[in-house]
Image: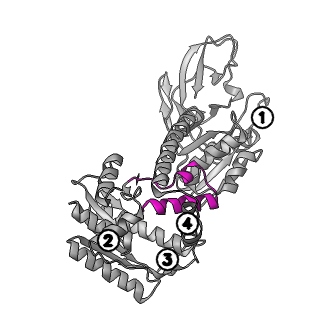
């Protein structure tokens, strides 16, 4: 069996986690794992600080942990960051105590990283912790990333002990006569992780699994997940697009289970639940679903995700056109191109409209309240633009994002992407016409 120092060095180098030039921040609870990691960082010559958050959930024991970690930092010559929080007061609706504590902890760590220019945040998760996480994910339901478990590195967060057997940590602590704090709540089976740790994980080792075998398996699963990510990225390029602040997923062209799997991987970041994702795949017609941050518009052919924070910035900037060819504002839903061309034999062409020769200036602008025009084919009758869009089933998220083409008297000549106005149609005597193309 490798020594802890050897295992640590090999893993840090193989996974390219950090270097001696990096400024590290260690999240330390005072327990065995993080205390040993603190001593290991000191022994290996790294520049590191220690951060400890007191959740004040265990009275004097919590205060004792804080005092222990502060003394540990002093002994090792590391800068010490401390914060006490009231977990119950900080809880959001639906959050468990563990969820609140984790959120507060990592929010604070991010603040320290930014304020003090730290390069990496380190946690002391080891191989057995990773197994517990995978088993919990399986119990709750998961995909390939949940089965692959924790990553050695995610952004600035690094887990340098992830392939380490906890036995090595205990051996290191015993050899160096290193004390640590024991959290009494770890012995309780009130929490799912503790039940997995005490009741389920040991069964795997009783049946013959070794920690080294598990480490090899977890590394293979992480590798498989990385190849899976390449496939997801390829599908993303083929069947998704970002347009303005929208993320658009084509709903057709794949099986329901394929789409559902893809959305589980991609849409969960917006806070959508498994049931909502199932509805995205199966609902018919035009519907909407929401999370606190995002609305998804469901149409027969597309799923369109819009952050609520961007919903007030839908309308593109107006464009004045004094000569052709010309291109509309790039942040409109359709990229519109206008030019003058000889009158074609066929006026019905894909992604193209033809109008009577224009007079300048022309204007591309978003719709306004009360806009009316004469859609071609209604015999000169006028119609509100809003009503036309509703009749044409133009989704609500798209209505504010598309241009109207108007003349200098603000008469609506066309809605690029949809129709032209009756009084601007092409006549037999027109030798040249205005061409509108979009994509």
If you read the primary sequence from the N terminus, does the residue marked by circle 4 or circle 3 appear first?
3
Work out which residue is located at the far right of the displayed protein and give it: 379
The mark lying in front, picked from 2 and 1, is 2
Magenta part mainly helix, strand or loop?
A: helix
Residue that label 1 marks: 381
Q: Where residue 70 sits: x, y (%)? A: 28, 78
Report helix, strand or loop for mark 2.
helix
If you read the primary sequence from the N terminus, does the residue marked by circle 4 or circle 1 appear first?
4
Give residue 413's quadrant in the image.
Answer: top right
The mark lying in front, picked from 4 and 1, is 4
Judge from the rendering whether residue 214 lies leftward or rightward of residue 24; answer left or right. right
If you read the primary sequence from the N terminus, does the residue marked by circle 3 or circle 1 appear first?
3
Mark 2, Cα crowd under 10 Å, few <14 / some 14-19 / many 20+, is: some
Q: Marks 4 and 2, how far apart in space?
A: 23 Å
Point 61% across, 58% down: residue: 138
Judge from the rendering whether residue 354 lies leftward or rightward of residue 226; answer left or right. right
Q: Marks 3 and 1, how far apart in space?
A: 76 Å
Does the magenta segment cover residue 149? Answer: yes
Residue that label 3 marks: 186
Q: Where residue 73 sits: x, y (%)? A: 25, 74
Q: Marks 4 and 1, how far apart in space?
A: 78 Å
Residue that label 2 marks: 173
Q: Where residue 233 sits: x, y (%)? A: 52, 38
Residue that label 4 marks: 202
Q: Which residues are magenta?
A: 126-155
Instruction: Confirm whether residue 371 shows in the render.
Output: no
């Amino acid at each position: 069996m490798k020594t802890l120092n050897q295992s640590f060095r090999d893993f840090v180098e193989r996974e390219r986690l950090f270097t001696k030039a990096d400024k590290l921040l260690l999240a330390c609870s005072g327990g065995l794992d993080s205390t040993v990691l603190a001593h290991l960082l000191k022994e290996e010559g790294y520049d590191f600080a220690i951060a400890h958050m007191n959740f004040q959930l265990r009275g004097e024991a919590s205060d004792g942990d804080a005092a222990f970690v502060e003394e540990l930092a002093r002994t090792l010559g590391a800068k010490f960051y401390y914060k006490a929080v009231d977990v119950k007061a900080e809880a959001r609706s639906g959050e468990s105590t563990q969820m609140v504590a984790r959120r507060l902890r990592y929010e604070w760590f991010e603040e320290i990283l930014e304020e003090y220019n730290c390069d990496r945040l380190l946690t002391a998760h080891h191989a057995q912790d990773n197994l517990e996480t995978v088993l919990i994910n399986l119990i709750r339901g998961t995909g390939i990333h949940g089965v692959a478990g924790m990553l050695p590195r995610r952004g600035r967060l690094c887990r340098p002990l992830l392939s380490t057997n906890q036995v090595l940590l205990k051996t290191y602590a015993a050899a160096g006569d290193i004390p640590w704090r024991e959290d009494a709540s770890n012995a309780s089976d009130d929490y799912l992780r503790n039940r997995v740790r005490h009741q389920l994980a040991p069964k795997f080792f009783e049946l013959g699994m070794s920690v080294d075998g598990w480490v090899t398996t977890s590394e293979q699963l992480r590798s498989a997940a990385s190849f899976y990510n390449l496939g997801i990225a390829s599908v993303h390029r083929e069947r998704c697009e970002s347009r303005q602040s929208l993320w658009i997923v084509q709903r057709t062209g794949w099986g329901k289970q394929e789409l559902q799997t893809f959305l589980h991987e991609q849409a969960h970041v917006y806070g959508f639940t498994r049931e909502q994702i199932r509805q995205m795949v199966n609902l018919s017609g035009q519907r909407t679903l929401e999370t606190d941050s995002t609305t998804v518009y469901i149409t027969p052919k597309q799923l369109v995700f819009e952050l609520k924070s961007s919903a007030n910035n839908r309308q593109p900037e107006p464009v004045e056109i004094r000569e052709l060819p010309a291109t509309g504002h790039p942040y409109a839903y359709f990229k519109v191109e206008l030019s003058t061309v000889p009158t074609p034999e066929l006026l019905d062409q894909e992604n193209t409209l033809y109008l009577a020769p224009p007079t300048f200036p022309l204007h591309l602008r978003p719709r306004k309240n009360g806009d009316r025009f004469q859609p071609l084919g209604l015999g000169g009758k006028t119609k509100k633009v809003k009503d036309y869009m509703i009749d044409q089933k133009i989704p609500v998220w798209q209505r504010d994002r598309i241009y109207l083409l108007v003349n200098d008297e603000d008469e609506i000549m066309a809605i690029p992407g949809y129709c032209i106005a009756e009084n601007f149609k092409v006549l037999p005597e027109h030798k040249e016409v205005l061409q509108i193309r979009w994509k």
